[in-house]
Image (cartoon, rainbow, N blue to C red):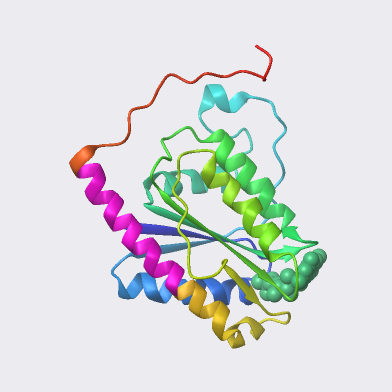
Amino acid sequence: MKVLLLNGSPRANGNTAAALNEMKSIFEESGVEVEVVQVGNKPVRGCIACGKCYEKGKCVFDDLVNETAPKFAECDGLVIASPVYYASANGSLIAFLDRLFYSSHFDKRMKVGASVAIARRAGTTATFDQLNKYFTICGMPVASSNYWNEVHGGAPGEAEADAEGMQTLRTLARNMVFLMRSIALGKEQFGLPEQEPRVFTNFIR
Ligand SMILES: Cc1cc2nc3c(=O)[nH]c(=O)nc-3n(C[C@H](O)[C@H](O)[C@H](O)COP(=O)(O)O)c2cc1C
């Protein structure tokens, strides 16, 4: 069982890292393998809508996106964590996620997703909603906790003092482990749900 953690902060050791570390310790004590990919400090460009990924099954820009896609394909769960910038996620992370989800064509259904927003003060729930959209367009169940997944802190390290935020993340990680295990059992017993051929309209025809 494996979980991929995406750190959307340019600070490798900032508050987003502290939040992910809190979850990492729960995954590790539960015997779940963890890999962290540092996204926010990479010069990731946005999607250019060239459509080449339809032919190639990968992005024309051969960077961290194509490097991460096989890791995403093999994981059972994905955590996306971002610092809040102007009440939304870090722009580099969004550029990365647009290209990762759009250009990779493996079956993402039943991989468990969770997103985490880290802010000094405000914009966490908007960011949380923004990140959850990536999961809910491709059949990924979203793990939840006993509060929305947000941690507060400004300067690096401050998030560690947010006792409630950190507890929310430990609970989230435990819930994710439970869901991943349950889904693995369910897949064994029942298989993945039947999929209809895709109907694709632009509302009018
Ligand atoms: C460009 C920029 C925009 C920010 N916008 C917000 C914001 O809208 N709301 C907020 O509470 N904090 C905002 N912050 C503060 C960060 O979210 C906060 O410092 C966070 O802990 C950074 O996480 P990190 O240490 O992992 O990078 C902003 C920081 C930067 C650099």
Q: Is 126 positioned to the left or the right of 36 in the image?
A: right
Is residue 149 a member of the stretch shown in magenta? no
Which residue sits at x=62%, y=18%?
201
| Residue drawn where x is 76% and y is 63% of the image | 85
In the rendered image, which quarter is residue 134 located in?
top right
Q: Of residues 104 and 177, which is closer to you in this image?
A: 177
The image quadrant that residue 54 belongs to is top right
**4 relative to 185 in the view: left or right:** right
Residue at the farthest bottom position: 161
Give coordinates of residue 22: x percent, y percent: 48, 77
The image quadrant in which ligand 1 is located: bottom right
Where is 169 relative to 144, above or below? below
Residue 119: image x %, image y %? 70, 72
| Magenta region, main secondary structure | helix
Q: Quadrant of the C terminus?
A: top right
Task: Name the residue furthest right.
Answer: 86
Instruction: Place residue 61 in its image quadrant.
Output: top right
The stretch in magenta equals 171-188
Q: Tell me which residue sits at (48%, 32%) in the image.
A: 105
Asked whether residue 108 is in view, the answer is yes
| View extreme (left): residue | 189
- For the question of whether residue 14 can be seen, the reply is no
> Looking at the figure, which quarter contains the N terminus?
bottom left
Is residue 89 shown left or right of residue 77?
Answer: right
Which is more toward the observer, 128 or 158? Answer: 128
Give the vertical position of 185 relative to 160 (above or below): above
Relative image position of residue 154 (x, y in whole percent): 73, 79
Is residue 175 one of those drawn in magenta? yes
Q: Is residue 102 above or below residue 26?
A: above
